[in-house]
Image (cartoon, rainbow, N blue to C red):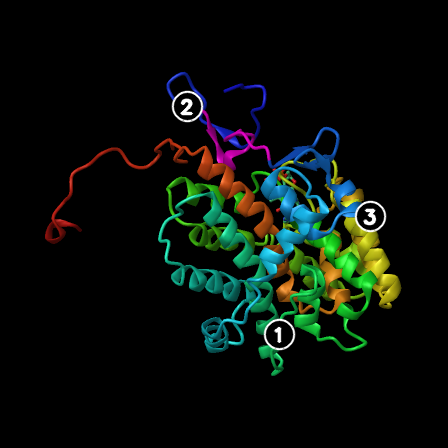
Amino acid sequence: MSTNTQNANTQNTTAEQPEVRKGLYGVVADYTSVSKVMPETNSLTYRGYAVQDLVENCSFEEVFYLLWNGELPTEAQLTEFNKAGRSYRKLDAGLISLIHSLPTDCHPMDVMRTSVSYMGTKDPEHFTPNREHITHVGHNLLAQLPMAMAMDIRRRKGEDIVAPDPEKGVAENLLAMVFGNGPDSPASNPEDVRDFEKSLILYAEHSFNASTFTSRVITSTRSDVYSAITGAIGALKGPLHGGANEFVMHTMLEVDDPAKAEEWVNKTLDNKDLIMGFGHRVYKNGDSRVPSMEQSFRALAERHDGAKWVAMYENLAAAMDKRTGIKPNLDFPAGPAYYLLGFPVDFFTPLFVIARVAGWTAHIVEQYENNSLIRPLSTYNGPEQRKVVPIAQRG
Ligand code: COA
């Protein structure tokens, strides 16, 4: 392994001991043809298409198809794909009863994780048998998870389920199941639907991030897709990964006054605390997805009286840049965008789950078809080998 990429995360390199890369910092673990992150040019492509290009020109379903199949669909292929996917949009009595049995104060990511685990118990295949099965599970998850999330939001407010509509796209259907079909629902505003859909495209895939890698590790043991996605959801929940979009909004609500943003940033950094929505393991000079998401956030703010949150966004980013030079990541504009659409703050990461099912399942196919068990080594730094002293003789 090259030593010119060593940094603070590389330890204990001697002639006798192998190099340790904490956090797998800078380690290249495998090949992938799903997406390419290029920090040097601050760009990201899905199957060779710039993400900004996809955001401007494609639906979420086209991007989902692209991630799975490697090519954008023709109109006929997309119609077939949507027909197949939407046929899975059936309310499941077992899932409804399970969700309603869960505590109303549990974290919504726990409901997502439990829902996927439950769906796995109903699948007759205990282990992934072939590629077609992964596609089947992907369609099932993309149909059922928006229903699970919408049901969870509504039961916490004492509201009835809104049934899925097979005529609607993923983004519009999700908004309708959460907010209903009334004139004030974002589902009834095509501009809101489109800005929301753009966020799903931006969240759909990002190479070997922690949750995708988790799904690949689980797949590498020849386990099943539901187990891989359950594990991925657990990884995504953490605030250093997907959970950051929720914590961004908690920050903005805590600061409350945009004029106090700089003081808050300085105080937080003085305390050596992290500020969520900033920094990235791969991008060190800005996240390629931020400009597109920021555009949608600003458009939502114009339509939904969100000037305060735009000022908050700008002041926090300026203060962070002035003090550290660390740039926002995708979660920074996505958090307030979801807030303006009306989603409860702790449901922001479940939205990320729904989008990322596309990337996770594409990586699960790739891992499945070219598998090697993922099993790194470690350098032991515990006590030397010793003998057990019987309990009666231990002081
Ligand atoms: N707030 C404050 N300081 C930060 C920071 C943040 N959001 N992100 C990075 N830093 C600091 C680190 O603490 C480190 O400081 P040090 O050198 O004094 O120890 C320095 O910047 C370099 O960090 P780096 O090693 O490059 O970060 P990483 O690759 O280990 O971590 C993240 C990347 C994403 C985990 C990190 O930036 C973070 O925790 N961000 C907040 C959570 C978040 O938004 N996650 C979503 C990611 S898409």
From this view, report whether residue 13 is shown above or below residue 344: above
Secondary structure at badge 1 equals loop
Residue 324 in the image: state x and y as whole percent: 74, 41
Q: Amino acid at mark 1?
A: Ala
Residue in the image at 78% along x and 41% along y: 53
Between the C-alphas of marks 3 and 2, the distance is 42 Å
Q: Note whether ligand 1 is within 8 Å of mark 3.
A: no
Mark 3, mark 1: which one is toward the viewer? 1
Secondary structure at badge 2 equals loop
Q: Which mark is residue 96?
A: none
Q: Is residue 276 visible?
A: no
Between the C-alphas of marks 3 and 1, the distance is 43 Å
Residue in the image at 71% along x and 75% along y: 180
Residue in the image at 78% along x and 56% along y: 263
Q: Is residue 84 visible?
A: yes
Residue occupied by mark 2: 18
Of residue 97 and residue 382, the one placed in the foreground of this image is 97
Mark 1, mark 2: which one is toward the viewer? 1
| Ligand 1 shown in quarter | top right
Magenta-tinted stretch: 19-33
Q: Amino acid at mark 2?
A: Pro
Residue 317 in the image: state x and y as whole percent: 79, 49
Q: Amino acid at mark 3?
A: Ala
Q: Which mark is residue 318?
A: 3
Whether residue 43 sits left or right of residue 282 in the image: it is right
Q: Which mark is residue 163?
A: 1
The answer to which of marks 3 and 2 sits earlier in the sequence is 2
Residue 116 in the image: state x and y as whole percent: 48, 60
Q: Does residue 209 show up magenta in the picture?
A: no
User: Magenta span: helix, strand or loop, mainly?
Assistant: loop
Between the C-alphas of marks 1 and 2, the distance is 56 Å
Residue 255 in the image: state x and y as whole percent: 75, 63
